[in-house]
Amino acid sequence: MFKEIKNKKVLITGANGGIGVATAELFAKHGALVGIHYYQSQKRALELRRKITSFGGRAEILKEADLTKSASRHNLIREFIQKFGRIDVLVNNAGGVYGVKDFLSLDERSWEKTFALNAAAPFFLAQEAFRCMEKQRGGRIINISSVAAKYGGSATTLHYGAAKAALEAITKGLARAGAPYNVLVNTVRGGIIDTLFHQKIHRTKADLQKRVKLTPLGRMGRPSDIAQMVLFLASRGGDYITGETFTVAGGD
């Protein structure tokens, strides 16, 4: 099923984070040429490339890019295509929350930056990639969402949940536009995954334990759980799937 992943050109945004690292490594292990996007952590990006090359994989680190800025988004796709000649798979993994505070105290800048990173960036990156994929008559765009879209986020991350819900709607629209060109667009909606994201939004160990108890499988997910679904959607197994949201959340 995964043989055709070999030599595919794959761009992964936020590739130096937990899910991004797992996804980059998995694609590289199956022979893909991986483009590593990062922001503010070149050290982790370098470590990821070293690990990939250590097992014979191929990866290139792209220039640091703040995806909340339009010029950075445009330049990222252009740089990737200049390095690899084409783009076969775009994984819109980069995400996060600005302004983790009660919604009554939420400011407009935090709202706008959270939407810029989680909704606008994936859309405009997909727009740039689509132009190339349309000419190729094929490609895959895989967006990484969150169960926050299902539940609306918490009182302190309501804007994050709203942005991820927008991303899932974008997936539907892009999938319809891409279908005539065999450009398939899907979303992977992650549950409570064991990454540094929870520290960044100030979740305590007790908070996490309480949240995990609400998950039927009774544990946090692993970054590899998300990566494996992404790989499947990019593979032959995903040839007849588009416009869908796949929840990987332990039953949540």
Image (spheres, rainbow, N blue to C red):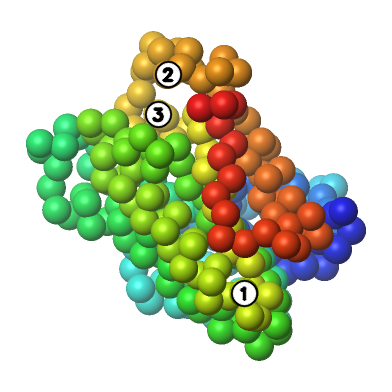
Please name the residue shown 42% across and 59% down the image.
169
Measure how far apart labels 3 and 1 are at the Cα level.
Answer: 39 Å
Image quadrant where residue 103 sits: top left
SS label for mark 3: helix
Mark 1 lies on a secondary structure that is helix
Looking at this view, name the residue that lies furthest to the bottom. 135
Find the distance from the CA under tag 2 to the CA under tag 3: 14 Å
Q: Residue furthest left?
A: 104
Query: In the picture shown, does residue 140 fall above or below 246?
Result: below
**Lateral position of residue 82 relative to residue 3, left or right:** left
- The amino acid marked with disc number 1 is Ala
Q: Which tag, 1 or 2, sits closer to the chain's start?
A: 1
Q: Position of residue 234 (x, y in %)?
A: 72, 59
Would you say 34 lies left or right of 190 here? right
N-terminal of the two: label 2 or label 3? 3
Tag 2: residue type?
A: Arg
Q: Is residue 50 above or below residue 209?
A: below
Crowding at dot 3, Cα within 10 Å, few <14 / some 14-19 / many 20+, comes out as few
Tell me which label, 3 or 1, sits earlier in the chain.
Answer: 1
Of tags 3 and 1, which is closer to the observer?
A: 1
Tell me if 71 is positioned left or right of 78 in this view: left
Give the label on residue 179, or none.
1
- Label placed on residue 199: 3
User: Is residue 180 visible in this depiction of the protein?
Assistant: yes
Identify the element where label 2 is drawn.
helix
Mark 2 vs mark 3: in front: 2
Residue at position x 89%, y 58% from top?
3
Three-letter amino acid code at disc 3? Gln
Total label count? 3
Q: Which residue was labeled with disc 2? A: 211
